Amino acid sequence: MQKMLFLLVLSLVGCANAEEEQKKLAAIQKTADERVAKAENEAKTKLSDAERQLNELKTQLADAKSKTEEALTKAQASAEEQAKAAEAALAKARQAFKDKARLQLADTNKELTEVSSKAGKVPAKSKAAFTKAMQDVAKQQKSVAKVIADFDTATVDSFKTVNAKVQSELAVLKAKIRAARAKIPA
């Protein structure tokens, strides 16, 4: 019986220790669970913050891309408008140069008309020379008209060259008209 009593006391003491150990284990388990839960919550918070920042960056990137595309579109439109304006200005300049040259040709043709109207006064011995001079004038008129037409294809860089050629051809035409006039007696 003593043995039994001893076993009983021992089992009671062992049970009390086991119970305490279970309580300690439960407390440790509870602390561990709380730490795990806290770590999981912190991880979820950090992940949520990172996702929010990523979404903000995606939005900023999309906005930047949109603004870049808009700026590019505006720049292209502006460049196209400037090209059209330059082409229109070039067309106006071509027309202005052509009009000026045609006006000069018209003035020169008035001189030619005066000379032609006096063709009847040319003596018979000078008639062949006068006719030849008038043919040269007609050829030169065609040459001037052709050079004036060159303004249609002139570029900004070639306007001066074409204009100089027109002025040169007009000067030759005027000289030929004066030569024909010289064949008419005063």
Image: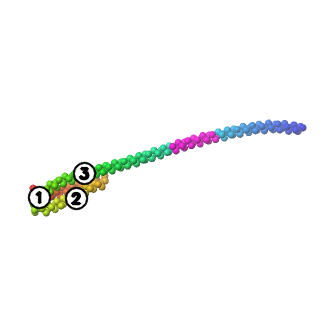
Q: Position of residue 86 (x, y in %)?
A: 33, 49
Tell me which secondary structure the magenta stretch mostly adopts: helix
Please provide the residue range marked out in magenta.
39-59
| Amino acid marked by disc 1 | Gly
Task: Tell me the number on the disc at residue 142.
Answer: 2
Does 175 appear above or below 71?
below
- Marks 2 and 3, the one that precedes in the sequence: 3
Does 176 appear above or below 38?
below
Secondary structure of the residue carrying numbered label 1:
helix
Instruction: Bin the neighbour count of mark 1 within 10 Å (Cα to Cα): few under 14, some 14-19, many 20 and up.
Output: few
Secondary structure of the residue carrying numbered label 3:
helix
Task: Tell me the number on the disc at residue 15.
Answer: none
Q: Is residue 182 in view? A: no
CA separation, marks 1 and 2?
24 Å
* Residue 58 lies within the magenta run: yes
Instruction: Bin the neighbour count of mark 2 within 10 Å (Cα to Cα): few under 14, some 14-19, many 20 and up.
Output: few
User: Seen in the image, is 175 located left or right of residue 89?
Assistant: left
Instruction: Bin the neighbour count of mark 3 within 10 Å (Cα to Cα): few under 14, some 14-19, many 20 and up.
Output: few
- Which quadrant: the C terminus? bottom left
- Number of numbered discs overlaid on the protein picture: 3
Task: Tell me the number on the disc at residue 99.
Answer: 3
Does 25 appear above or below 123?
above
Residue at 85% of width from left, 39% of height from top? 7
User: Seen in the image, is 33 located left or right of residue 136?
Assistant: right
Task: Tell me the number on the disc at residue 120.
Answer: 1
